[in-house]
Structures are given as structure tokens and as C-alpha cells.
């Protein structure tokens, strides 16, 4: 019983962190913070993967986490490069200022 | 030898292409000689092929050149059907076409668009050859439209004048009405037989339901009416006089207007399979046209208009022959008509050339002294068209009338009366142009005086020109074609000094006059063996041709009656215009001069109730048809403008949409999938 509650607590924490990241992505305009929010969501998912892997006695849940980490690293590289490029061209601009592709 | 047949249309086409690409560089007169040479070579090939055709079974030879429109079950090949009918047509199209080309070198001398003229002429001859040589209805239609387009180019060749341009338009638009019938007829043929190739569907025509055959025949008849200028679509032909005179000769004698008669003769098995009233309709339309056009020709003062209405009238005879089942008679009259009408038109062109582009017969007279060759050749053709024994027109007209008499006495009578009127107006023309007083001298003096008095370049417009302008486009003013020569002569105030034309113009005249004189030997009615043309056409038309026995006495009586009517017309005209026993004004009624007010009627209708009808149609087009098309477009634009709001460029908005989308998909999956 105790173990089950602990696992449920991990899942709840993962869901909470995911929601926090999602809301942060929607409400914040600083691109750096937005990327951090995305990272938060990814890691919430990682936590959930690990918990399910432990619950179901399946190692693949923990393996997938490595893939997610790799993808997240790649994503940060691209994202930060975009932010740097943006900061050079338009210092002080936030995400809402970049709407050249609006319809 | 018959394998050379493809060269017949290919040569004028080659001439057309060369002149089209390099015409202006070749220039005058070489472009003319090139155009003439291609058609003349085509005629020589036709002669060789003709000699070879005697050895073919049933004198028929067909060849598939290439596949044109393959579309599932339906396919149209470009193929040539050379049978006695198309051979006869080809021979006189290329022969007379070549002479007209030669003549044009002289007539168009000095024209600024000299090479262009021959480009069109070559294309015209090519189209006509495609029309008669095509082995299916679609290919014939190609040629059919080709001659229509070329006639438009050539009628409005001197397009600087509004009247000429609108005459071209009138010819084109009137022809479209007939083309509609041709197209619907072609569709019906494909629907009924599954093929449009003559060799495939004509032999099966006798097994066709009568209603279907009648429908096909009526539609193709409408096409023939448009092209061959019969009631009610004849109105374009007189206006076609706006073109240069060789064009009139080409359209009226060798090509174009004979296409309708050719088509009807070609589909004679379909005519035979259709309802009994259809041949009657054809014959009545023909006879009515022959009579009506002849009366109009009575009162014309323009030298070419008389001939134009006379063409309409003579083609009426051909339709009368077709309706009476006399297909060979129709072709016979077509050929002799080609001889004498080409001669008449070229003669008229020579006169116009000599008169410095004045076409009003009231300014002519006594021209036989200054233009002897033109006068003699013109008079040969005059006797031929009047039906005086032994000229060609006598034999062909009598052949037509014999069939008409076999059909009905009334039609025969109408034909005879029309023949009398024909002889009358042609004699009137000859007297006005070549005999009497030399009115050109005084008219030239009057012109110079008028010019001096008013200091304007007076164009002596005939009285109907004013009325014609009122009537708008429908009637084209009978003003003289002002070529560069006329402009020059008016500007400098020189008196008109008629002169004989150069040899390139008189040689075709002499050849044609000879043919018009002796052309009757093609088909003499005395015995089976002298009817060369009828025997030659036997494989094509023999099966459905009206058969009747005629005793020698009957034949003699018919010939005598025809002669009486022809000579009667001549003598009446002599009495009126030379002896002046009757005032000419009592015959040249304004009613006739204005063409029975048919043009006025058409104009009034199109300007009044017709106009409103078309406005209604245009409104329907604008509101309903355009409305539907534009409505779809407007709905798309409106929807897009609304959807565009979702693309606002905010990353967070997109993220929210992604989140909502994921939520929706998860919701959907959870409601659809059970984890039992």
C-alpha cells in the first residue's frame, strides 16, 4: 500500500510539473523562460516514464528516458541558437514580437 | 499513281506556310507566282491521280494518313477518301483556284498586303481540299471551318474600311448558325452509328430508323444552308462582295458555297433513309432561293452584287436538284456554274480594274470597245448562265429542271421562271456594262467638276448607301472598294480611262470562257453514253438517285421550253434596256433593290425584340452563371478570411491550439477505445 501511494505521488508530481510547464509556456513571453518550461514538461514526462517502468517492471520505460534526454538536448541547442540570433537582431524582443508569419 | 493524292492538299498547305513565314520577304510579284504555282501543281497532281483512279475498283481509293483524335471507342483519323465525287470536286477546285490565283497577280498588283493575300488564298484552297477529301465528318468540318475563317480574312481584306470589316463579321457570324447544325448533325451521326467515317456509316444508313435519319439530315441541311447561302441564311453572301474580286470568284465559284451541296450529295444515303418531306423541303428551299435571289438581282446597280445574288440563285438550283434526287445534276450544275461564274466574276474584276475601282454599273457602258477580251469572255459566260443553247449552263440547268419536273410540275415552273429572270438580269448587266453610251466619260467629268466645286474628294456613293448606313452592320454599303489606285485617281482628279487588263488577268478569262462555252459536253442528255459525269458519279450517287425514263420527244420539248424561257429573258431585257419599250423603274422596284427588306428585317429584329431577348440571356449569364462561379469564389474567400484569424503569429496561441488538439484527440480515443 505504501509503495503504491508513493508511485501515485510520483505520477501526481509528474502531472503537476507537466501542467506547470504547459501553463508557463502559455503565459510567459520571455523565450528563455519558455524553453525552460518546455524542459520542465519533458522532464515531467521522463519522471512519469520511470514511474510506469517501475510499476510495470518494464525496463523500456527507463530506456525511453535516454532518448528523451537526447532529443531534449538537441532541442535546446536549436532553441538557444534561435534565441541568440533573435537577441542579436532585436535586443529585448519577446516571443510576441515575433509574429511575421501571422495570416 | 493514286498514291500521290496526299500531295493535292499538301502543296497549297506548303505554299501557305512558306508565304506565312517568308511572305513579306518574298514580296510582289514572286509571292503571287509561288501561290499560283502550288495550286497549279496541285491541279497537275489531281490530273495524274484522276488518270490513276480509273484503275481502282469502283473508282474509289482511300488512305489513312495518321491518327488524329484517338479517344477510347471514338477515334478520328486523318484519312483521304478519293471517290468520283471528291475527284470531280478536287479537279475544279484546283483548276479554277489556280486560274483565280493567276488572275490575282494582276488584280492585286500594287496592294500593300500583296503576299498576305496569297497566303490566305492558299489556305483557302487547302481548307476546301480538306473539306472534300476528308474521309470523315470531323475532317470535313475542319475544312468547313477553315473556309469559313479564310472567307472572313479575305472578305475583310481591306479592313481599313468599316463596311468591309463588318461584312467579314457578318459572313462569319451567319456561317456560325449553319455550323451549329453541322456540329449537332455530326454528334447525331456518332450517336447513331458509333463512327463518323463516311465509308463506315454511309452504307449502314439504309438500316437507320427514319426519325434518326431525318434528324441527322435536317441538321446537316442547316449546315449546308449556312455555307451555301440559302434562305434564310443567304444574307452574308451579297455582303461578301466587300472583298477583293478574285476572292468573290473563289468563294462563289470554286469553293465555299459549293461545300453545302457537296455535303448533301455526300450523305445521299442518309437523305434517302429520312422522311419523305425532307427532300421536298430541300427542293422547295432551293427553288424559293433561286427565285427570290433572282428577283433581287434584277434591281442591283453594283456590278458584283448582281453576280452575288445570281450565285445565290444558281446554288438554289443545285439544292433543287438535290431535293429532286438529281445528285449528278447538282454536281453538273456546280461544275458549269464554277466555270461561268468564275468567268463572270473575273470579268467583273477586270472591268472594275479598268474603271479604277468603280463598281457602279450606271457609270459604265460601251466598255466592249476599250476592253474587247473582257467583253467577249464575259458574254460567253453571260450566254452560259442565261441558259442559251449550246453553252454549258443550258445543259446543266436543263438537267436540273428535268429532275425538278420529275419531282413536281410546280417546282419545274418556279425553276423556269427563275431561269427567265436570270437571263433578264444578266442581259441587263451586259447591256449596262458593255453596250450603250460610255457613261464613264461624263461621270468622270462630273466628278472632277464636283470636286472643283466642293473641294472634297467626292465618292459617288449610290443612293442605297445612306439607307444602308441606317441599317447598321447588317447591310454593307455598296461603295466601291477603294484600292490604292482609286485613292490616287480621286486625289489627282484624273478622269477615268478604262483600259484592258494585263495578260495574267485575260488568260484566265479566256480559259474560263472556253470552259463555260463547251462545259456542257461533260453531261449531254442524249443517251446513256454521253452522260459522262453521271456515269462517273454512279458509284457514289447511283443507288439513291431518282430514276426516270425520258423519251426523245419529252427531252426535246423540255429543251425547247428552256430555250424559249432563256431567249425570252434575253429579248425582254433587250426590249427594256435597248429599245426602252418599258420604263426600267417599273421592273427595278425598290423592294427588289433592297433585297425584299430581309436585311432591314433582320436589323430591326436584332435591334428591337431580339436585342431585348439577348439582353435577357446576358442577364441570366451575369446573374445565374457568373453568380454561381463567383459565389463559390466569394465563399472561399470569406471562409479563408475568417480562418485567417487563427494564424495570429503568437507562439503561445499555437501552443494552446496544439494542447487543445491533443486533448481533443485523447478525448476521442478514450471515448472510442475500450480497455476491457
Image (spheres, rainbow, N blue to C red):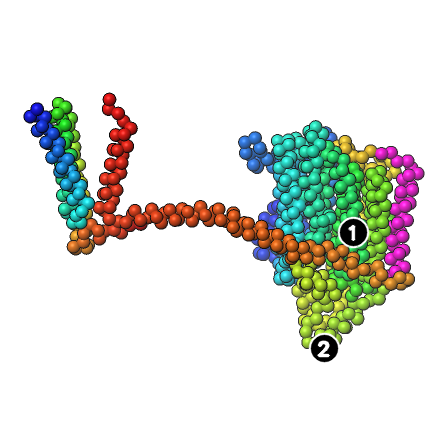
- Quadrant position of residue B611: bottom right
Q: Residues within 10 Å of mark 1 (few under 14, many from 20)?
A: many
Q: Determine which of the numbered discs, if any, sits on residue B453 in the image.
A: 2
- Quadrant position of residue B570: bottom right
Taking the magenta stretch, the answer to whether it contains residue A20 is no
Nearer the camera: disc 1 or disc 2: 1
A75 left or right of B100 in image: left
Give the residue at x 61% y 57%. B27
The residue nearer to you, when weighing B570 against A5, is: A5
Give the residue at x 67% y 55%. B605
The residue nearer to you, when weighing A54 against B141, is: A54
Q: Secondary structure at mark 2?
A: helix
Give the residue at x 10% y 26%. A4
The C terminus of chain B sits in image quarter: top left
Task: Quote the CA–CA distance across marks 1 and 2.
Answer: 42 Å
B16 left or right of A31 in image: right
Question: To which chain does the residue with label 2 belong?
Answer: B
Q: Secondary structure at mark 1?
A: helix
Magenta stretch in the rendered image: B548-577
Q: Is residue B67 visible?
A: yes
| Residue B233 percent coordinates (x, y) | 70, 49
| Residue B393 percent coordinates (x, y) | 82, 47
Q: Is residue B354 visible?
A: no
The residue nearer to you, when weighing B612 against B604, is: B612
**Magenta-colored segment: predominant secondary structure:** helix
Q: Residue under label 1, please give it.
A: B292
| Residue A39 percent coordinates (x, y) | 14, 40
Amino acid at each position: 500500500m505504501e509503495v503504491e501511494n508513493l508511485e501515485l505521488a510520483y505520477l501526481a508530481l509528474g502531472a503537476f510539473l507537466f501542467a506547470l510547464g504547459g501553463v508557463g509556456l502559455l503565459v510567459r513571453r520571455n523565450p528563455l523562460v519558455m524553453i525552460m518550461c518546455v524542459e520542465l514538461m519533458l522532464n515531467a514526462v521522463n519522471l512519469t516514464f520511470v514511474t510506469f517502468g517501475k510499476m510495470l517492471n518494464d525496463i523500456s520505460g527507463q530506456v525511453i528516458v535516454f532518448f528523451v534526454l537526447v532529443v531534449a538536448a538537441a532541442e535546446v541547442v536549436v532553441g538557444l541558437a534561435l534565441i541568440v540570433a533573435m537577441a542579436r537582431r532585436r535586443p529585448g524582443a519577446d516571443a510576441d514580437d515575433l509574429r511575421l508569419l501571422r495570416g | 499513281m493514286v498514291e500521290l493524292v496526299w500531295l493535292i492538299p499538301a502543296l497549297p498547305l506548303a505554299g501557305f506556310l512558306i508565304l506565312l513565314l517568308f511572305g513579306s520577304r518574298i514580296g510582289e510579284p514572286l509571292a503571287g507566282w509561288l501561290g499560283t504555282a502550288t495550286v497549279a501543281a496541285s491541279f497537275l497532281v489531281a490530273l495524274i491521280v484522276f488518270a490513276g483512279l480509273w484503275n481502282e475498283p469502283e473508282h474509289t481509293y482511300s488512305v489513312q494518313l495518321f491518327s488524329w483524335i484517338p479517344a477510347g471507342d471514338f477515334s478520328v483519323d486523318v484519312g483521304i477518301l478519293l471517290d468520283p465525287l471528291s475527284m470531280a470536286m478536287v479537279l475544279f477546285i484546283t483548276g479554277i483556284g489556280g486560274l483565280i490565283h493567276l488572275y490575282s497577280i494582276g488584280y492585286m498588283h500594287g496592294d500593300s498586303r500583296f503576299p498576305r493575300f496569297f497566303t490566305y488564298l492558299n489556305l483557302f484552297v487547302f481548307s476546301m481540299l480538306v473539306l472534300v477529301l476528308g474521309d470523315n465528318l470531323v475532317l470535313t468540318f475542319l475544312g468547313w471551318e477553315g473556309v469559313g475563317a479564310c472567307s472572313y480574312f479575305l472578305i475583310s481584306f481591306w479592313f481599313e474600311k468599316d463596311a468591309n470589316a463588318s461584312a467579314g463579321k457578318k459572313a462569319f457570324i451567319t456561317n456560325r448558325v449553319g455550323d451549329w447544325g453541322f456540329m449537332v448533325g455530326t454528334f447525331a451521326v456518332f450517336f447513331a452509328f458509333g463512327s463518323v467515317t463516311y465509308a463506315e456509316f454511309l452504307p449502314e444508313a439504309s438500316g437507320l430508323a427514319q426519325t434518326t435519319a431525318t434528324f441527322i439530315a435536317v441538321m446537316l441541311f442547316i449546315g449546308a444552308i449556312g455555307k451555301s447561302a440559302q434562305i434564310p441564311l443567304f444574307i452574308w453572301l451579297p455582303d461578301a462582295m466587300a472583298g477583293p474580286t478574285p476572292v468573290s470568284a473563289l468563294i462563289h465559284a470554286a469553293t465555299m458555297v459549293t461545300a453545302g451541296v457537296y455535303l448533301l450529295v455526300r450523305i445521299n444515303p442518309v437523305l434517302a433513309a429520312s422522311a419523305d418531306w425532307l427532300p421536298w423541303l430541300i427542293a422547295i428551299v432551293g427553288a424559293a432561293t433561286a427565285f427570290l435571289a433572282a428577283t433581287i438581282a434584277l434591281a442591283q446597280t453594283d456590278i458584283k452584287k448582281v453576280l452575288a445574288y445570281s450565285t445565290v440563285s444558281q446554288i438554289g438550283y443545285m439544292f433543287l436538284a438535290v431535293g429532286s434526287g438529281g445528285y449528278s445534276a447538282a454536281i453538273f450544275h456546280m461544275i458549269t456554274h464554277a466555270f461561268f461564274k468564275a468567268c463572270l466574276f473575273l470579268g467583273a474584276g477586270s472591268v472594275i480594274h479598268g474603271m479604277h475601282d468603280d463598281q457602279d454599273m450606271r457609270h459604265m457602258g460601251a466598255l466592249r470597245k476599250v476592253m474587247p477580251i473582257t467583253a467577249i469572255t464575259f458574254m460567253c459566260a453571260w450566254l452560259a448562265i442565261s441558259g442559251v443553247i449550246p453553252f454549258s449552263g443550258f445543259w446543266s440547268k436543263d438537267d436540273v429542271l428535268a429532275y425538278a419536273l420529275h419531282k413536281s410540275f410546280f417546282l419545274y415552273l418556279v425553276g423556269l421562271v427563275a431561269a427567265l429572270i436570270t437571263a433578264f438580269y444578266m442581259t441587263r448587266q451586259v447591256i449596262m456594262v458593255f453596250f450603250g453610251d460610255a457613261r464613264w466619260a461624263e461621270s468622270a467629268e462630273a466628278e472632277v467638276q464636283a470636286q472643283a466645286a466642293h473641294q472634297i474628294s467626292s465618292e459617288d456613293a449610290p443612293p442605297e448607301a445612306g439607307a444602308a448606313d441606317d441599317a447598321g452592320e447588317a447591310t454593307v454599303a455598296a461603295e466601291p472598294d477603294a484600292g490604292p489606285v482609286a485613292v490616287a485617281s480621286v486625289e489627282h482628279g484624273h478622269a477615268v480611262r478604262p483600259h484592258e487588263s494585263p495578260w495574267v488577268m485575260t488568260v484566265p478569262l479566256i480559259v474560263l470562257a472556253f470552259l463555260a462555252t463547251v462545259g456542257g459536253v461533260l453531261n449531254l442528255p442524249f443517251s446513256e453514253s454521253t452522260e459522262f459525269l453521271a456515269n462517273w458519279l454512279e458509284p457514289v450517287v447511283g443507288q439513291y438517285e431518282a430514276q426516270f425514263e425520258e423519251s426523245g420527244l419529252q427531252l426535246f420539248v423540255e429543251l425547247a421550253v428552256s430555250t424559249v424561257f432563256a431567249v425570252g429573258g434575253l429579248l425582254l431585257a433587250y426590249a427594256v434596256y435597248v429599245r426602252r419599250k418599258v420604263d426600267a423603274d417599273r421592273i427595278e422596284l425598290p423592294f427588289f433593290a433592297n433585297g425584299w427588306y430581309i436585311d432591314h428585317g433582320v436589323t430591326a429584329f436584332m435591334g428591337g425584340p431580339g436585342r431585348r431577348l439577348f439582353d435577357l440571356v446576358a442577364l441570366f449569364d451575369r446573374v445565374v452563371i457568373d453568380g454561381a462561379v463567383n459565389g463559390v469564389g466569394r465563399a472561399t474567400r470569406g471562409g479563408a478570411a475568417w480562418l485567417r484569424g487563427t494564424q495570429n503569429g503568437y507562439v503561445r496561441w499555437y501552443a494552446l491550439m496544439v494542447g487543445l488538439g491533443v486533448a481533443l484527440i485523447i478525448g476521442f480515443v478514450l471515448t472510442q477505445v475500450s480497455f476491457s
